[in-house]
Amino acid sequence: MDPAQVIAQLAFRTPLPVEAIRSVEADRAAAIPIFLHAIDSYLSPGGDPAAQEALFFIFHLLGAWREKSAYRPLVRLLRCPTEALDAVLGDSLLETGPRVMAAVFDRDPNPLYDLILDENVDQFLRGAMCQALAIATLQGDLPREEAARFLRACYFELTPQRECFVWHGWQAAIAVLGLSELKPLVEEAFARGFISSSWLGLKDFEEDLQRAIHHQPPQPASGNFRPFGDAIDELAGSGFFELEQPQLAPPAEKPARYFATQWEPVPGFNRFKGVGRNNPCPCGSGKKFKKCCLRADALDAA
């Protein structure tokens, strides 16, 4: 497998390059070191533009393959400046990113802890990594007691001690794990204004917490709190891409980059497929889906 050809196959484009992904998946053992080298090349001084073009698919394929050796390289990637991460991963950073990181999680939570606690890291990414931590716990890769210990310590150690989206991710992790013993801390966080009422209210947290408690053991396959699955199925259902279609005429020219922020509706395609009413809205607003785009769609249909 020629590394340059692999990277070229996965250069970011639309529609979703199903055949290229299948070709790479046919020889995962050869692809993995190429992928890890591409991440390292991108992170090296000056970066590698060729590697950057393929990183979107590299990120998601490593998650689909549950490749534990990618855990630390991907944590390093997530420490890139927000603008650089947006160029590489687009909206998938917050939508599928937590599930990918939970899939590659190698049972050492410290790299995730460091991201969550680092005030220099983007606040939305920090909140998303709280979600990744919860998924890792739900799938049995992190003891529930250890997750509870860390989330309790976060109340005292997270900065800033004011409104910030990392607190949204923190409360969501506590709720989905059913950590009722931490409810008083969440109540205090709401009272102190750490969690914006424009995102959700205390009642929403209590509903999510009770749902988790009443459905023990929690189901990691529900909502956004589940590991990343098959790359083609996941990306085809994400709304980031159109699927490849047989062409009877030359295709219209389209942009090289195709993120959700540039998404053009495909007739009959449900871009919110799999999003629960109480999940974070895929648009990235920080609100629950039922309080954001679900409501907007309902108003548009009225």
Image (spheres, grey):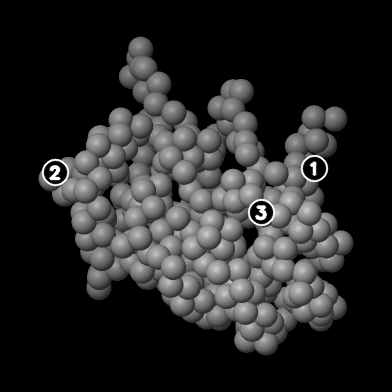
The quadrant of the picture occupied by the C terminus is: top right
- Closer to us: mark 3 or mark 2? 3
| Mark 3 element type | loop
Judge by depth and name the residue closer to the eye, 114 or 6. 114
Is residue 198 at least partly visible in the picture? no
Can you give x and y, in whole percent of width and height, for residue 181 in the image?
76, 74
Q: CA distance from mark 2 to mark 1?
A: 48 Å
Q: Few, some or many C-alpha atoms within 10 Å of disc 1 (few <14, some 14-19, many ≥20)? A: few
Nearer the observer, 28 or 77 = 28
- Tell me the residue that label 2 is attached to: 1
Q: Residue 74's quadrant in the figure?
A: bottom left
Secondary structure at numbered mark 1 = helix
Other residues around mark 2 within 10 Å, as few (<14) / some (14–19) / many (≥20):
few
Residue at 62% in and 36% down: 273
Which label belongs to residue 108? Answer: none
Mark 2: secondary structure: loop
Three-letter code, disc 1: Arg
Question: Residue 147: where, in percent of width, then height?
Answer: 59, 72
Residue 218, disc:
3
Q: CA distance from mark 3 to mark 2?
A: 41 Å
- Residue 298 seen in the figure: yes
* Residue receiving disc 1: 295
Do the numbered discs 2 and 1 sit on residues whose CB atoms are within 8 Å? no
Residue 196 picture quarter: bottom right
- Please name the amino acid that badge 2 sits on: Met
| Looking at the image, residue 226 lies above or below residue 86 | above
Task: Decide which of 267, 105 is in the foreground and name it.
Answer: 105
Q: Earlier in the sequence, mark 1 or mark 3?
A: 3
| Image coords of residue 98 (percent x, y) | 52, 58
